[in-house]
Amino acid sequence: MADIKYEIVQKIGVLSTSASGWAKELNLVSWNDRDPKYDLRDWSSENKQMGKGVTLSREELKALRDLLIGIEL
């Protein structure tokens, strides 16, 4: 499998941290030198390893925000 190149352009926030030190983070990430997208996934400390996640465009993030505002928690 080819290496995946990434650059965390902006750290937006941490949603949670597990006992092992991995953190679920929302970041703006550039994957393989492409335009940055919003990315939600688990990261090891110092962001050396990553878990599975979801990458969203600005429009998709806005749609998700609107959906979350509309639900009762």
Image: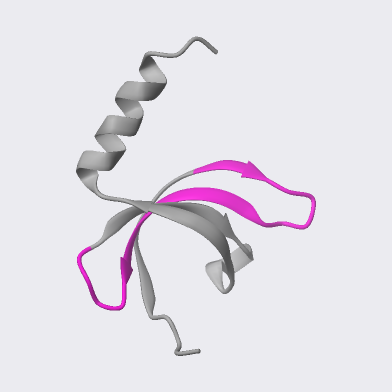
In the image, residue 30 sits, relative to residue 67, either above or below, namely below
In the image, residue 35 sits, relative to residue 6, either above or below, namely above
Q: Nearer the viewer, residue 5 or 55?
A: 55
Farthest residue toward the front?
Answer: 1
Residue sitting at x 36%, y 71%: 7
Magenta stretch: residue 29 in it?
yes
Residue sitting at x 50%, y 89%: 1
Q: Quadrant of residue 63?
A: top left
Residue 51 position in % (x across, y down): 59, 63
In the image, residue 47 sits, relative to residue 69, either above or below, namely below
Residue 54 position in % (x across, y down): 44, 53
Residue sitting at x 57%, y 49%: 24
Farthest residue toward the top?
Answer: 72
The quadrant of the rendering that contains the C terminus is: top right
Farthest residue toward the bottom?
Answer: 2
Q: Is residue 19 left or right of residue 15?
A: right
Residue 41 position in % (x across, y down): 52, 54
Q: How many marks?
A: 0
Type of colouring: one colour
Residue 42 position in % (x across, y down): 58, 56
Residue sitting at x 38%, y 74%: 6
Please give the range of residues in magenta: 14-35
Farthest residue toward the right?
Answer: 19
In the image, residue 27 sits, relative to residue 16, either above or below, namely below
Magenta stretch: residue 27 in it?
yes
Q: Nearer the viewer, residue 10 or 68?
A: 68
